[in-house]
Image (tube, grey):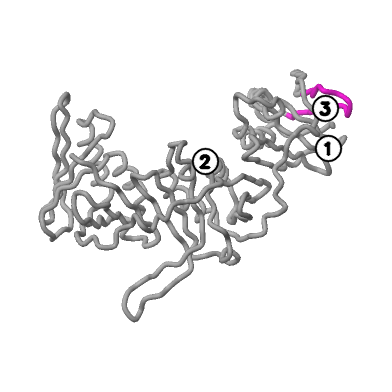
Amino acid sequence: MNITIERAALLRSLGHVQSVVERRVTIPVLSNVLLKASGHELSLAATDMDLEIVEAVPAEVVRAGSITAPAHTLYEIVRKLPDGAQVELDCSSDSSVLTLRSGRSNFKLGCLPAEDFPQLSGSDLEHRFEITAGDLRALIDRTRFAISTEETRFYLNGIYLHASRTVTGSGPGAADLPVLRAVATDGHRLARVELPLPEGAAGIPGVIIPRKTVGEVRKLIDEAAARIEISLSETKIRFSFDSISVTSKLIDGTFPDYERVIPIGNDKIMEVKAKPFSAAVDRVATISTEKSRAVKLSLSRDTLTLSATSPEAGSATEEIEVKYNGPPIEIGFNAKYLLDVSLQIEGDGARFIMADAAAPTIVRDIADGGALYVLMPMRV
């Protein structure tokens, strides 16, 4: 293999793929990036056996070939080369050394054969549909904060993506519409976001996308073109856009029946401006030093009083104006969970739909009917 490539293009692609590579591995080749030169491009691939990222980048290919090189080392070398540099990568077919030349710099890296590099098979991904980059960003951003980090409940360590139906409106004008729905929960809060079902997604199985995959895809789609192709089966999922392909195994588990935890009888409704509410919660929670960071919400007509107490730090209260004309109610929440949900409110206002101090509370974005959040209350 012998190629010449622009430093900026190589650095960008190495940055995309090398983030998958774990720092500590038991299989040496998993520390490496697969470099494959053919035609007029260089293909780079990295994997941790559960997640694989492949990207193609234009290059001047003098001699086709393939090799695997230490991912993090190669990335750091290219990162430290001067802007505008040309990088030559050279490796003979029978060599285990990759030579990198750029200007007066010359590096030799120990390599492993391309044949040793494992690849995730993805030819059996029978379901395919397209989604805009903006919609995929919204599905991820508005649900991933609720993904569980508790490894014993591994089936909650991702986002549950599936086709469903939702009822909009009420009475004679109600409509039953197909939707693509993303759900995440850690048992204390739940996020459910939906959008109109894309063409081709009607028959997809419900799948749980792992947390690491969610994070890697989210980083990459910031630079993505307008549309993302999603291909999936019951065991794998692939996101394809521009010259990048991300293939991942899915979590092998059953996501719980989340509909059961969404209350249907809540009758106390408070509407509040999201940003002032979030800022007030953050201020009051400063006094709450314990791990739970409990904040109490005391509601009376058109007034919400936020309060927190701590044996060591003292107490704090703050009043804000809200829309509420129900009976007085007091309910406590983890301040972090309130802040996480408040950040998801894209419109001006949030609607809290409550029952009592012990029942789950629904939070909705007044401007967006496709997002729903559930918070479990705390004793305060």
Callout in the foreground (1, 2)? 2
Residue for badge 2: 215
Residue 48 x/y as whole percent: 64, 34
Q: CA distance from mark 1 to mark 2?
A: 33 Å
Residue 116 x/y as whole percent: 78, 32
Which one is nearer the viewer's eye here, 18 or 168?
A: 168
- Label located before the other in sequence (2 or 3): 3
Residue for badge 3: 90
Q: Quadrant of the N terminus?
A: top right
- Label located before the other in sequence (1 or 2): 1
Q: Quadrant of the rendered structure where residue 81 is? A: top right
Left or right position of 197 against 29: left
SS under mark 1: strand
- The amino acid sitting under disc 1 is Val
Q: CA distance from mark 3 to mark 1?
A: 10 Å
SS under mark 3: strand
Q: CA distance from mark 2 to mark 3?
A: 33 Å
- The amino acid sitting under disc 2 is Gly
State the extent of the magenta-drawn residues as a range.
86-100
User: Mark 2: few, some, or many residues within 10 Å (few <14, many ≥20)?
Assistant: few
Judge whether 271 appears above or below 108 on screen. below
Residue 180 x/y as whole percent: 50, 61
Which one is nearer the viewer's eye here, 325 or 311?
A: 311
